[in-house]
């Protein structure tokens, strides 16, 4: 699998096979094949857009929830993780080391909605021993992108030797 | 009583020294003025990275200020930085310099070049320099009292200088060969063998090589050869390097010179009386760059390489013949098919299509007929500039 192609797409999912072919000096056909293969094997999981909804005045509440779990025989954390990540309200789930086990990012339209999910769905699961909910107050950076960034561009002198 | 013009003897001789008066002003001023009043213009005329300094490097500079590092450093630069430079040159090229006596931290390669020339040139000494070359080489040679002897190169040889062309111009007065590879403006890189040829001429005629290697890290599919690393060349090379291009640190103004002790001693003398030292926060940031900046550097190089391929192909597709540059971040396409001089081309292109490029003639006579275009420019802007230039070429070819 061509890593260079993946690196380009990871930075800009909209890069076309033609553009990538030029950037890598590879035949377009080969680029297309490589992308197809990566999609098929889920090396490329999905193409997404990072939207700054706040700019449109859209309210969205996110909460980061620490979840302490009683692991189950044979399946460890995986079964309970799946129980949790299948909820559409759950945006991300990570198994972490430290004082709790799962870090769960939950999204809701209101604080009440997010909180309700925690005490109705999450905290009531049998092997969940406890939860700590942190509501996100501000998003500074997401998936490597500074949301209010870009201010650094265009400061160069327009013409220099 | 009739009014009489009183001219003081001093005034009669002119305020500005003949030497400075004899130096041509930068050839891009008018483009600069035009460009700064223009909306929607795209500039391919920039000579610096479009990345900001990697954050861990900037942060080291900020931290140094917080810790109160706001004073002069040793004239030669902070010992820790000189040690890091020494280690870096060893890792990169196997060179062994003594950080105490053979390294000087300068205010960018620009200062290093000035110091090098002033330290070795006696009046009327000749400096051989392949052209097209960076714009400061000729004036700095003249300001140092030397005579600049250009060695023209051609596109047929991808603007690589031939050792024989250098040797042809060696005279009794020749003191040094001044080279800058990877080259600004052409993007040309010399192979080890080609650099070796220059080294042989230097050894044969007992010349010093002043080597501006600011673009050393920006090479694509070819290895950069440091001239000082060739046999018996360390003692006759003044190696000038810096952080601006490899780590996107142009504004920090830090570079270094590496040479044998008596040369560094001489350069330090000039440096201490004219500059005192390079800015301390820049030096602190440079230490961080050398200690931990490698990944960031390689990532930027990979990114330039992608855009390089887009630009080279783009120019050739629209009919502006462009050889493949293997270093720096410039393409140097020919604009001869339009029938314009490079100056006319650049001016018309800016006025009609709002794309700024630098006329090749600014880099020496043999740059006539070419323009320098920088691909350290957002990909979308490169693509749009290519569309506009394609339109322009169609109109005038």
Image: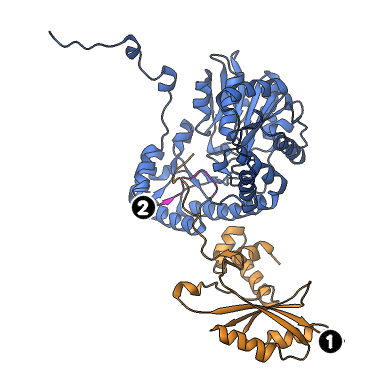
Chain colours: A orange, B blue
Name which quarter of the figure residue B17 lies in: top left
Residue B12: in magenta span: no
Q: Secondary structure at mark 2?
A: helix
Q: What number is the disc on residue A72?
A: 1
Crowding at mark 1 (Cα within 10 Å: few <14, some 14-19, many 20+): few
The answer to whether one can see residue B169 in this image is no
Residue span colored magenta: B42-49
Q: Residue at x 41, y 38 (%)?
A: B28
The answer to whether one can see residue B3 in this image is yes
Q: Secondary structure at mark 1?
A: loop
Q: How many marks?
A: 2
Question: Which secondary structure type mostly characterizes the magenta part of the structure?
Answer: loop
Q: Does A36 appear above or below A130?
A: above
- Residue under mark 2: which chain is it in? B
Report the front residue among B179 and B280: B280
Q: Position of residue B83 (x, y in %)?
A: 74, 36
- Residue under mark 1: which chain is it in? A
Report the front residue among A105 and B185: A105
The residue most toward the left is B1
Q: What number is the disc on residue B353?
A: 2
Q: Does B13 appear above or below B327?
A: above
Have a look at marks 1 and 2 and say if they share a chain.
Answer: no
Q: Does B340 appear above or below B393?
A: above
Q: Position of residue B105 (x, y in %)?
A: 65, 32
Name which quarter of the figure residue B116 lies in: top right
Report the front residue among B341 and A104: A104
Q: Residue at x 36, y 52 (%)?
A: B353
Residue B43: in magenta span: yes
């Amino acid at each position: 699998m061509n890593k260079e192609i993946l690196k380009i797409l990871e930075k800009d999912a909209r890069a076309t096979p033609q553009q990538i072919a030029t950037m890598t000096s590879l035949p377009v056909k080969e680029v297309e094949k490589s992308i197809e293969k990566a999609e098929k094997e889920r090396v490329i999981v999905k193409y997404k857009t990072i939207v700054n909804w706040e700019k449109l005045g859209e309210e969205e509440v996110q909460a980061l929830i620490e979840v302490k779990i009683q692991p189950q025989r044979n399946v460890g954390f995986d079964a309970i993780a799946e129980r949790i990540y299948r909820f559409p309200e759950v945006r991300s789930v990570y198994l972490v080391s430290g004082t709790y086990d799962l870090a769960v990012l939950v999204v809701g339209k209101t604080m009440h909605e997010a909180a309700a999910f925690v005490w109705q769905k999450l905290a009531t699961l049998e092997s969940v021993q406890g939860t700590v909910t942190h509501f996100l107050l501000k998003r500074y950076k997401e998936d490597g992108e500074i949301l209010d960034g870009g201010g650094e561009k265009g400061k160069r002198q327009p013409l220099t030797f | 009583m009739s009014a009489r013009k009183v001219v003081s003897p001093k005034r009669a001789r002119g305020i500005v020294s003949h030497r400075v008066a004899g130096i041509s002003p930068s050839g891009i001023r008018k483009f600069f003025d035009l460009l700064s009043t223009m909306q929607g213009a795209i500039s391919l005329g920039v000579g610096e990275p479009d990345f900001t300094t990697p954050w861990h490097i900037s942060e080291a500079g900020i931290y140094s200020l917080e810790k109160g590092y706001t004073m002069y450093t040793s004239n030669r630069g902070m010992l820790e930085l000189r040690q890091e430079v020494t280690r870096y040159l060893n890792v990169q090229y196997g060179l062994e310099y003594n950080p105490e006596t053979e390294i000087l931290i300068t205010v960018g390669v620009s200062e290093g070049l000035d110091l090098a020339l002033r330290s070795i040139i006696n009046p009327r000494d000749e400096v051989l320099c392949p052209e097209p070359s960076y714009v400061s080489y000729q004036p700095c040679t003249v300001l140092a009292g030397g005579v600049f002897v250009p060695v023209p190169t051609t596109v047929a040889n991808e603007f690589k200088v031939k050792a024989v062309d250098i040797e042809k111009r060696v005279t009794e007065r020749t003191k040094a060969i001044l080279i800058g590879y990877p080259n600004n403006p052409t993007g040309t890189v010399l192979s080890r063998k080609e650099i070796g040829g220059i080294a042989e001429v230097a050894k044969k005629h007992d010349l010093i090589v002043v080597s501006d290697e600011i673009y050393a890290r920006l090479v694509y599919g070819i290895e950069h050869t440091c001239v000082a690393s060739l046999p018996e060349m360390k003692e006759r090379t003044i190696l000038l390097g810096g952080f601006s291009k490899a780590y996107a640190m142009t504004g920090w103004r830090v570079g270094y010179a590496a040479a044998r002790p008596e040369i560094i001693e001489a350069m330090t003398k000039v440096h201490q009386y004219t500059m005192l030292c390079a800015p301390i926060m820049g030096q602190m940031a440079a230490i961080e760059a050398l200690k931990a900046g490698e990944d960031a550097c390689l990532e930027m190089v990979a990114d330039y390489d992608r855009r390089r391929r887009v630009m080279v192909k783009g120019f050739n597709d629209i009919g502006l013949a462009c050889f493949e540059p293997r270093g720096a971040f410039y393409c140097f396409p020919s604009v001869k098919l339009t029938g314009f001089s490079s100056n006319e081309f650049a001016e018309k292109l800016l006025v009609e299509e709002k794309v700024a490029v630098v006329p090749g003639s600014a880099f020496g006579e043999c740059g006539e007929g070419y323009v320098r275009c920088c691909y350290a420019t957002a990909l979308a802007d490169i693509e749009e500039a290519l569309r506009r230039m394609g339109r322009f070429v169609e109109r005038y070819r």
